[in-house]
Structure formats: structure tokens, C-alpha cells
Image (cartoon, rainbow, N blue to C red):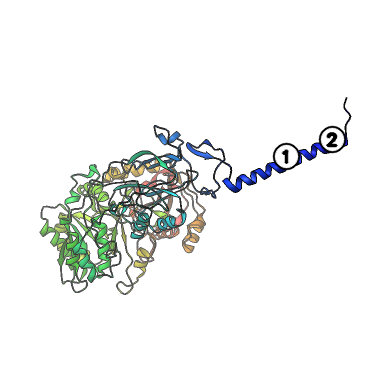
């Protein structure tokens, strides 16, 4: 056995140190002459994406905390393996408005039904080009709202090197502003400036890319219908732009441009990005309404004193699917408002000048003009001044128009005086009411000839919303929607005095339907007998709940105008909540007025509640049916309700 020697141990340690020193020296010489040693890489499969490993340190994007992940689909349905540094994408724009858009990135859907609010308008997905995974997904409804939020998103969230996937669904062009189009063009779009009504468009591009996107499709709609974009593809993490020129402007409207040169104060209609837009009537897309008499009914627009306000009204009218401009007539007084005839010519509408100023005389001109120009029409629609029409105004009216054959129905109205946001939530529901709301209504031409014409001054000396035919309705009622199909723009005090009635009706926020199509669920129950049977069914249904209130609680709630004081909770959506009470006001509805003021319905001290039907008043809250049932209504006799102890006022 060898002895351990201190000398030999020191000799071995010294040899190892010399070897390490020589090794580091040779490494330094190699670095000096030849650079870094090669780093071995492998292909690493990460979330349906092939990327090099180890990852490059570039400062990884943080995924938005609000971004949701939907369906997982390997390779996004692409039927081949994507090349190195590519990632799979699927974009689908939906085949109709009842469908939903889809965007899949690297095996995950980040835009689809109930995922990241995917839907109508512009759907955007931001992809981290290094990791090749989505980091943000948003939808902007550029049909209902302007594109200012979308513009901020494009400027702030799409960073250098990021890949943007943009796709429309349904209608996205209506409020897509010029700045948004310019931002998309800067990102590589060559076609977004040509996007029109219900056109389908998608683009995949990258911030910092030179040229135009190699992935862009624009499909025009035909009659409001479109063929869907449905693309499965592999996208490289570094896009190369195409060196092409974008299409030239295809929109030119010389007549509108000339008009706007003289009326530049009409800001939206005559803005730089709008004045060349063609004015074309919207096509009818709902086949169930084809052949409806509504599309051959004269629409009489009463002009006020503001050309800007009238222009907005006419724009919303022209955008009604199925509108035929030759049936539209604008009645105006040239002493009060100028250049109406020129404006109407741009839209293809008719104009009728009159010098009369009294309201009943103006309405006489309206009806006489309709009868003279369209003698074969059975109906006439009247739009009072300053109205903006909901997208489905004509579709709604067409759906209930046949009810005018019922002798117990006087008119069809598109406006609900009780249509405030917290008490108007069911666009599919319509009611029978005793009052005449005015604003936007349709009556039979025979009603004018036989009843209104001989008594215009007595009947119609006030505006429609102040009440017509108060003494000549003969138990006939008006059809009114739960959610209004028109919105009256505020009129300044210099044009209209601020009375308590005007303040109660028009100086509060209102609910207006914004959907293109909102089918009615109860239009077939509005004939007199069926309506009473339907009310009985609602009051006796298992979904009906009786709300018990004390007089003290109602009075306090009405005095403070604070519904929350009642501490009512509506749990079941589309349930029926009934408030039975005994009306102690023998000559009026003092008790009903207290309830209206408490719940936030129309209330004016010297006016009868609006929306009454034989001692009953209906409205909706959060999708639930709410019924005020007084002892003046026949259904109050039901044992479940007539035992109430609530007496008002």
C-alpha cells in the first residue's frame, strides 16, 4: 500500500490548475479570432407552434388579464403541419347575422360566441410574433358606436413587431371613422377604405411591416347578405409586405359634395370622410317581410327648423332595410327652414313646401299630400320633427301593420312614453294602450278621411305626444312597443319652451332599440279578445309573483323618486310581477301616478299616466313583465289579487 505523500498531492493540484488556466486561455483566443461558440438548438413544440429552444430573450408580451380562451382545436383545423416559425390561424366571419365570428390562433379560439365579446363590428386579435401566441382580443361594435376606442386600441396595444388579426362580422362600416381606416391602412390594409354595408373583411398584418398585407380579403354584401370568409392558414412570425398600390377611391358623390360646401355646419353628414359617400337605400334582407304593405306606404316627415336635425332623420330613414325613397315626402315651411328640397334630392325623397304654421293645418297638408300622391295606399306613416329611427323601425311597423284591420285598434306607434332605460327592456313585446303617443305612428288612410279630416282643429291642434282624438277614440287603442323604435333629439329652449310635460317626456335618458332585427313574440295576441285572454294567462301563470307593498313605502319611494327604497329583487328573468292595489281616486289615477313616480315611469303632476289599458299598466324591468293592477281593471277580481290591502293615493 502506497503511503500518502503531501508533496505528491500538491503536485497533482498544481497540474489541475495549470490545465484549467490553459483551457480558459485557449477559449479566449478562440473568442477573439472566431466569435462565440455555436449554441445547439432543438425544435420545441409549444401550443401547436414550432419554435426554437432556448427561447430568445426579447421581453415577452404579457397576456391581457381580460382575454378569455375558448375552444381548443389542435392546429386550428389546418390539415397540414405549419412550417418552422409559422403558426396556425383560422378566421371565420359567419354566414349570417345569427351566426358568430371565430378566430383561432395556435390551437385556441380567442374570438367566438361568448368569448372576448366576439360579435358584430370589428374583431381584433393581437399576437406576440416571437412566442406566436395571442396576447389580447377585443371586439368593437362600430355599427352602434363610433370607432374612437378602437383607434386607441390600435395605437396603444399593437406594438412594434406585433401581428394583428382583424375581421368584421355582420355590419362594421357604419361608424368606422376615417382615423380608424387610416390606422388600419398604416398597418398594411389596402382595402379597408372600400368596406361598405355588411361587407366582410379580414386582414393579418404586422406592425413595422413594409408594404401591404399578404393576407387580406374583402367581400361585398348583396342585398344585405354575404358569403362568409373561412380561411385556414399558416402565418409566419415575420410577415413580408407586398409592394402594391391600394385601390383608388371608388366613392364619389358630386351632388353631396356641392351641397356640403354650402352647409359645412352639418358636421357629420358633411365631414371630409363622409361627403363623398353615396346615399343608397338599404336592401330588405328579412324575407318574412317581403310583400308587406309597409314598403308601399307613404312616409310623411314633418320638418322643424333645423336642417342638421332633419338630415340625421333622413339618414336613419334611408338606412331602413326595404325603404323605397319615392314613398318618402318631407313637408316643410321654407320661411322656417331653407334648402330642404336640395337635401331631399340627395336622398331621392320628395319635398312638399307649405306656408301654413298652425300645427293642425300642417298635419292637414301632410295627410292631403299623402292621399294625393299615393291614392291607392291604405295607410300613412307620420314622423314628427327631430326623430332618429331605430334600425328596425320599418321592420317593427311592418310586423304589426296588419293589426290596423282590427276595428278596436286606432294606430300603431313606434314610441313608448314610458320607455326609460330601467323600465324598458323587452324589444320583443308590444302593448295595447289607451293614449295616443304620437311621434312616429301609422294609421289607416280611411281614419284620416272619415274622422280626422272633418275635425282637424279639434282633434290635432296639439302635437301627437300631447294627445290626439281624446274624445273620439271610442274604446279604440294604440299598439306601442316596450322598447321604442324612435328617439327624439333634444330641442333647445330657443326652439321649444321647456314645460313640465316636455321636461318629463324628453329631458330624461331613453331606451331605443339598436338591433337590426328584433322579432316580436306577442304580435299575434293583440286583437281585443286575444289580448285579454293573454293577460289572464299571465296573471294566472306559475311565473306570476304578487308584490306586496305598503302605502307608506310607496309614498316614500314616490317622494324621493328612488325605486331602490322598495328593496325589491327580481330573481327570475321573464317572470311576471304584479302590483295589485285599490285606486282610491274615483275620478282619476292618483294612486297609479304614485306608483309611476316611484318606479321611474312617466310622471307629470297634471297629466294622466301614459300606457294605461283599462286600469292596468304594463312595462318591463330586467326582462321581467311588471303589471300595475288596479281595481278598475276586470282582472283585479281574481281572488289572488283582490285581497290586497294597498290603497292609493
Provide residue 252's location: percent of width, then percent of height.
21, 59
Of the pair 245 and 540, the residue shown nearer to us: 245
- Helix, strand or loop at label 2? It is helix
Provide residue 311's location: percent of width, then percent of height.
25, 64
Provide residue 416's location: percent of width, then percent of height.
33, 56
Image-quadrant location for residue 181: bottom left
Image-quadrant location for residue 576: top left
Up/down of 68 relative to 466, above or below: above
Question: From this viewpoint, is residue 470 visible?
Answer: no
At label 1, counting other C-alpha atoms closer than 10 Å, the crowd grade (few under 14, some 14-19, many 20 or more) is few
Left or right: 439 in relation to 24 = left
Of the two numbered discs 1 and 2 on the same chain, state the one appearing first in sequence: 2
Question: From this viewpoint, is residue 393 visible?
Answer: yes
Provide residue 209's location: percent of width, then percent of height.
40, 51
Query: Where is mark 1, residue-wise?
Result: 19
Up/down of 434 relative to 232, above or below: below
Query: Where is mark 2, residue-wise?
Result: 8
Of the pair 436 and 580, the residue shown nearer to us: 436
- Helix, strand or loop at label 1? It is helix
Amino acid at each position: 500500500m502506497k503511503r500518502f505523500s503531501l508533496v505528491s498531492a500538491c503536485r497533482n493540484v498544481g497540474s489541475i490548475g495549470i490545465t484549467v488556466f490553459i483551457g480558459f486561455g485557449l477559449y479566449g483566443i478562440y473568442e477573439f479570432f472566431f466569435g462565440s461558440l455555436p449554441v445547439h438548438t432543438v425544435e420545441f413544440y409549444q401550443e401547436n407552434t414550432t419554435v426554437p429552444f432556448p427561447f430568445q430573450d426579447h421581453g415577452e408580451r404579457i397576456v391581457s388579464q381580460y382575454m378569455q380562451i375558448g375552444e381548443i382545436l389542435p392546429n386550428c383545423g389546418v390539415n397540414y403541419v405549419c412550417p418552422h416559425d409559422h403558426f396556425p390561424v383560422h378566421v371565420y366571419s359567419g354566414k349570417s347575422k345569427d351566426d358568430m365570428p371565430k378566430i383561432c390562433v395556435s390551437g385556441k379560439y380567442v374570438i367566438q360566441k361568448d368569448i372576448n365579446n366576439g360579435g358584430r363590428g370589428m374583431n381584433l386579435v393581437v399576437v406576440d410574433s416571437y412566442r406566436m401566441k395571442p396576447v389580447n382580443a377585443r371586439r368593437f361594435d362600430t355599427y352602434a358606436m363610433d370607432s374612437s376606442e378602437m383607434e386607441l386600441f390600435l395605437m396603444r396595444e399593437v406594438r412594434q413587431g406585433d401581428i394583428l388579426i382583424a375581421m368584421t362580422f355582420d355590419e362594421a362600416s357604419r361608424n368606422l371613422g376615417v382615423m380608424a381606416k387610416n390606422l388600419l391602412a398604416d398597418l398594411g390594409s389596402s382595402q379597408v377604405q372600400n368596406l361598405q354595408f355588411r361587407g366582410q373583411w379580414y386582414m393579418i398584418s404586422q406592425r413595422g411591416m413594409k408594404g401591404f398585407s399578404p393576407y387580406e380579403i374583402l367581400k361585398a354584401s348583396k342585398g344585405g347578405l354575404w358569403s362568409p370568409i373561412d380561411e385556414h392558414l399558416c402565418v409566419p412570425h415575420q410577415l413580408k409586405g407586398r409592394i402594391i398600390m391600394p385601390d383608388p377611391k371608388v366613392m364619389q358623390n358630386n351632388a353631396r359634395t356641392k351641397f356640403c360646401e354650402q352647409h359645412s355646419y352639418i358636421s357629420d353628414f358633411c365631414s371630409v370622410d363622409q361627403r363623398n359617400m353615396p346615399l343608397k337605400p338599404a336592401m330588405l334582407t328579412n324575407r318574412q317581410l317581403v310583400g308587406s304593405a309597409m314598403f308601399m306606404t307613404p312616409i310623411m316627415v314633418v320638418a322643424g327648423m333645423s336642417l342638421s336635425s332633419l338630415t340625421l332623420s333622413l339618414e336613419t330613414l334611408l338606412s331602413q332595410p326595404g325603404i323605397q325613397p319615392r314613398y318618402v315626402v318631407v313637408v316643410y315651411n321654407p320661411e322656417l327652414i331653407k334648402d330642404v328640397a336640395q337635401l331631399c334630392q340627395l336622398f331621392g325623397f320628395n319635398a312638399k313646401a307649405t306656408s301654413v304654421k298652425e300645427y293642425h293645418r300642417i298635419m292637414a297638408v301632410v295627410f292631403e299630400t299623402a292621399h294625393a300622391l299615393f291614392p291607392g295606399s291604405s295607410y300613412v306613416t307620420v314622423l314628427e320633427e327631430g326623430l332618429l329611427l331605430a334600425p328596425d323601425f320599418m321592420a317593427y311597423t311592418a310586423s304589426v301593420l296588419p293589426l290596423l284591420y282590427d276595428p278596436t285598434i286606432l294606430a300603431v306607434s313606434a314610441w313608448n312614453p314610458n320607455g326609460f332605460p330601467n323600465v324598458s327592456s323587452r324589444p320583443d313585446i308590444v302593448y295595447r294602450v289607451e293614449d295616443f303617443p304620437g311621434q312616429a305612428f301609422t294609421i289607416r288612410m280611411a281614419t284620416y278621411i272619415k274622422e280626422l279630416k272633418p275635425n282637424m282643429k279639434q282633434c290635432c291642434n296639439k302635437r301627437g305626444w300631447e294627445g290626439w282624438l281624446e274624445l273620439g277614440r271610442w274604446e279604440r287603442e294604440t299598439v306601442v312597443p316596450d322598447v321604442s323604435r324612435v328617439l327624439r333629439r333634444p330641442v333647445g329652449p330657443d326652439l321649444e319652451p321647456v314645460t313640465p310635460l316636455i321636461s318629463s317626456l324628453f329631458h330624461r335618458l331613453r331606451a331605443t332599440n339598436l338591433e337590426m332585427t328584433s322579432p316580436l313574440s306577442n304580435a299575434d295576441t293583440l286583437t281585443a279578445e286575444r289580448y285579454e285572454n293573454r293577460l289572464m294567462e299571465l296573471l294566472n301563470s306559475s311565473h306570476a309573483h304578487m308584490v306586496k307593498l305598503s302605502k307608506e313605502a310607496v309614498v316614500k319611494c314616490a317622494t324621493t323618486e328612488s325605486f331602490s327604497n322598495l328593496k325589491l329583487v327580481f330573481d327570475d328573468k321573464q317572470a311576471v310581477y304584479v302590483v295589485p292595489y285599490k285606486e282610491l281616486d274615483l275620478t282619476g289615477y292618483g294612486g297609479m301616478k304614485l306608483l309611476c313616480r316611484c318606479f321611474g315611469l312617466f310622471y307629470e303632476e297634471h297629466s294622466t299616466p301614459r300606457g294605461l289599458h283599462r286600469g292596468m299598466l304594463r312595462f318591463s324591468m330586467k326582462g321581467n313583465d311588471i303589471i300595475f293592477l288596479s281595481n278598475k281593471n276586470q282582472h283585479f277580481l281574481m281572488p289572488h289579487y283582490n285581497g290586497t290591502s294597498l290603497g292609493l293615493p
